[in-house]
Every structure is written in structure tokens, then in C-alpha cells.
Image (tube, rainbow, N blue to C red):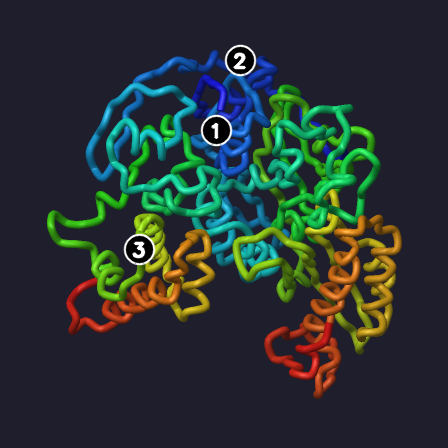
Amino acid sequence: MSAPHVPSRAPAAAVLPERGPEPVKITLSVNGDEHTFDAEPRVSLLDALRERLSMTGAKKGCDQGTCGACTVWVDGRRVLACLTLAIACEGHEVTTIEGLAQGDELHAVQSAFIEQDAFQCGYCTPGQIMSAVALLKEGHDGDDAEIAEWMSGNICRCAAYPHIRAAIRTVRDRSRDPSHGQT
Amino acid sequence: MRPISYSRADAVADAVAAVAADPTSDFLAGGTTEVDLLRQNVLLPRRLVDINDLPLAQIEDRPDGGLYIGALARMSEVAEAPSVRERFPMVAEALELGASAQLRHMASMGGNMMQRVRCGYFRDAASPCNKRDPGSGCAALDGFNRGHAVLGVGEHCIATHPSDVAVPLMALDARIHTEGPHGRRVYAIDDFFLLPGATPHLEHPLEHGELVVGIEVPGTPMARTSRYLKVRDRESYEFALASVAAAVTLHDGVIADVRLALGGVATKPWRARHAEDVLRGAPAGTGTFRRAAGAEFASARTTPLNAFKVELAQRTMVRILETLTGTGTPSGTETDAAPDTDTHTDPGREGQP
């Protein structure tokens, strides 16, 4: 331990309010709607979505942050719901696969997945799609190698990877060609 | 996961005071390691203090051409910052070669410095582990240790330090800023990571309640052409078997200055000082690079399963130095201009180890 040692500012901090460990009221904004439910602070965002809010789109694959099946967005950024505590998402906007379509009209990436046959068993698909839409927004869609690298956090046991990349390319190319009119 | 309580702090002083006053409280940032280890009952805090709302997400230029990176800047934000990409490309490369896009959006830079090892025995609460349960022994010594360290190891722990970005930060002599119950401290990064020695459960010189608030990267002109080379079992989303962060300046074909650090092979992010000593003042070329790499690994201690890392890491060092200096190329020019890593290609070297 080297380096300067600045004297303490002697923080007279207030005691932080503590919630839990018993169930507490948690309010989340999911797909633009506010939901309030009771859950312990240890409950993950994934379990809160699936078990408390009956939004079963995000899937529980590994529950340890390696498979990507639980990918959702928090404040517009793709994250893993299994390694996120629900209570830590209060005050932030959560978006799940259920929030992607506009009414009955599928998101362009959802349509492209169907069109390109980009899944077999379908279990990883909600995570793949949430990741793919974010990848397109992030601009990591230059070529197949770049798409593969920036989709590497989403594992597909059926190995539908070539078709997943094709679906992403389809949406990328349509968004570059205004005559197709959909993005 | 055991039951936990939760508090959220919006001021650094509040967070520090809350954790410092309670041995059973810990900070929570991105959570990518911590929540995983909570679920496996490897970490057992009573309460988490969520620090994600603290104003520590800045990425600021320093007058010396360096940077100050707030502890809550996310890996993805740092990787895409123009100042990082232009002045410290090896930092951006190390970040983008680590984890996955989702994890990089979550994981904070401070949390990256504090992340725990990936040793399977550390993460398995049923195995002996001196890091998790001091004095219980080390199951990795005679266990499945293919991924374990060969440098900085001892009788008590051989777990590899998992961070990518800490490797270029080590090469850059970064400084870790903390705020704790006894005020603000600044650590040289080499002092911030402890060798396991007889106390592998002590990984940092921090006291309980001391919070990483930022990382200072000194201005380093030679880092503008730096690179990070990572070798692993699969192409993406995997920890390093061996990785090297390097920056080199040449003068008339002689190495004027060099920074070299290693990942994937040591119990802490490893500054390759022995190799640097061989390289400084020596003519750039494969022979010199091999001698330097050999000097660094002279003290390596291996197991039958991880012995391959010694040769692999040396080849990785030679490869990145050849790339940075443009040596071994058909044109073979070694100039005192800034080395351009992109214009030198050598098809003849591709198949070589």
C-alpha cells in the first residue's frame, strides 16, 4: 500500500434504511407498466418476472449468467436477469420480450426469426431476440464475424447460429434499404 | 441463496459508513460475480448495500493525457469511450474480449478489480479452499487444475486471477482510488492485488467498508499503439489460458521502452518485469523476444495439467511483440516511427507456434 493518505472527511452519514430479509413491496416498471408485488430482496429479476408477474418470456437456462436465455433490457441495455436483483431495478425501466411487439404486429427481428427459421426448440429464442435487437441498436452488425462475437453471450443448444445470424442480417439490410419500409 | 437485506445508497459517505459499521454488510455493484456467488452460498453477507446510484460513472481526461475512470463506469462504456480507444487500445481490446455483451453492460470497473477467482473449488462450498475457508487446504493443488496459475503460486492457492482489463491496467501502472472509513487512499495497482502466499483469503489491502471509487490511468504516449492478445479454448466468451498486454517503442531497431503484462497464467494480474528488463535496450527480433519470455517464466511452477501454459504464454508474448514491432515480416523494416500493427502481415508466421 503506497501513496497519499488523505485525512478522513469523517462522514456523519445517516443510517441507511434497510429492507428485508422478509418479503418487501417492490415496484418495477416493466414494458412501460408499473407492477407492485411482494418479494424478498434476494429474488432475482428473472424470478420476479416469471413467478410474480407471470411474464415467462425470459427463460431460466443456467441461472448463473452463462447462457443468455434470460436476456432483458434495463434502461435500454441488454443484461442478464438471472444475475440482477429485482429490488435493484426499482427506478429503472425493464423491457422484456413481451414488450417488443406493437399490439399484434411483431417486431422486425421477431418476424425475421420466423422467416429465417432461426430457432428449433425455441427455448433460447426470447434471449436471442432481446440480444439481437440490442446488437442492431449498438451497431455491431457489420459482418457475420462481428455479429457472432457480439451474440456470443447467447448460447443455442440446437446450434441455430447460422439462421440467427441470417435473421439479424435481414433486419440490418432492410433497415439500410428504405424501400422495405420496416426496421 | 440465503435471505439478505437490502439498502440503497446515493452518497459515497453513506455507503462507506453503512458497510464499515457492519461486518456482515457488503457493497453491491454490477453483481455479475457477486450474485452468482451468493446463490452458491460462497458469499454469505447479511445485507447488501447497493452502490449503483453513486455518482462514480465518469470517464474523464487528465491533463497528463491520462484518464480517470469512475468505479461505476461499466465495462461496455469504457470500451467504447473514444479517449480509451485512441490512447489505450489495449484497454478497449481487453474489455471487449472479456465476458459477453450483456455482462459488459452490467459489470462495473470497480467490480472488475474486486472480482473473485473462477477456481471450481473456490466456488464449490463442499471443497477445501484456503481462499473461501482459511486453513482448510487447497483442493486445486491435486485436482483438476488445467486452468490454474503457473506464476505467483504457492502451497496454499493456485487460482488464476480472471480479469482481462486488469492486465493492461497493470502494464500502464494504473492507480486504484478508494474511499473508506479512514478517508481516501490511492494504491499502485501492483500493490492493490496481493499474492496468495500463506493468506489467499486476503486478495486486496483494503479494510472492510473501503470502496473502490475510481481507476487512474497515467498518460502513456506509447500506449497509443498497444495491443492485447488473448488465447483461450474457444473463440469468444471465455477466460484466458494466456493473455498479454503490450506496448513497445523502437529506436533504430532497438527497444527503447516496453510495457508487458500477463493474464490467465498468474495468481494476480502479472507485470512481466523480468521480460521487460531483457527487452529494454535490446534489438527487436524473435530471438530477443524468446529470451525475454523465457526469463519471465523461469520461475514458473506447473502441474501436469497446466504445464502447457508456460510454452503457450511464451509464444503469445513473442507473437504480440513481433506484431507490435513488425519484426519477422518480409519487408522487415524496424523504424523509430510508431509501430503500425495493421500494415505488417506475415503469412509465413501464421502456421508457426
Picture quadrant where residue A4 is located: top right
Residue at 54% x, 36% y is B33
Q: Residues within 10 Å of mark 2 (few under 14, many from 20)?
A: few
Q: Chain of mark 3?
A: A
Residue at 22% x, 43% y is A98
Q: CA distance from mark 3 to mark 1?
A: 29 Å
Q: Chain of mark 1?
A: B
Tell me the element at label 1: loop
Q: CA distance from mark 2 to mark 1?
A: 18 Å
**Which numbered marker is on residue B51?**
1
**Which numbered marker is on residue A12?**
2
Q: Are marks 3 and 2 on the same chain?
A: yes
Tell me the element at label 3: helix
- N-term-proximal mark, 3 vs 2: 2
Q: Nearer the viewer, residue B73 or B300?
A: B300
Looking at the picture, how far across and down is residue A112, in whole percent? Answer: 24, 63
A140 shown above or below A143: above
Do we see residue B63 in this rendering? no
Looking at the picture, how far across and down is residue A84, in whole percent? Answer: 42, 34
Which amino acid is tagged 2?
Ala
Q: Chain of mark 2?
A: A
Q: Nearer the viewer, residue B57 or B269?
A: B269
Q: Residue furthest left?
A: A104
Whether residue B191 sits left or right of residue B83 in the image: it is: right
Do we see residue B161 in this rendering? yes
Of badges 3 and 1, the one in the foreground is: 3
Looking at the picture, how far across and down is residue B267, in whole percent? Answer: 74, 43
Residue bearing the label numbered 3: A133
Image quadrant holding the C terminus of chain A, namely: bottom left
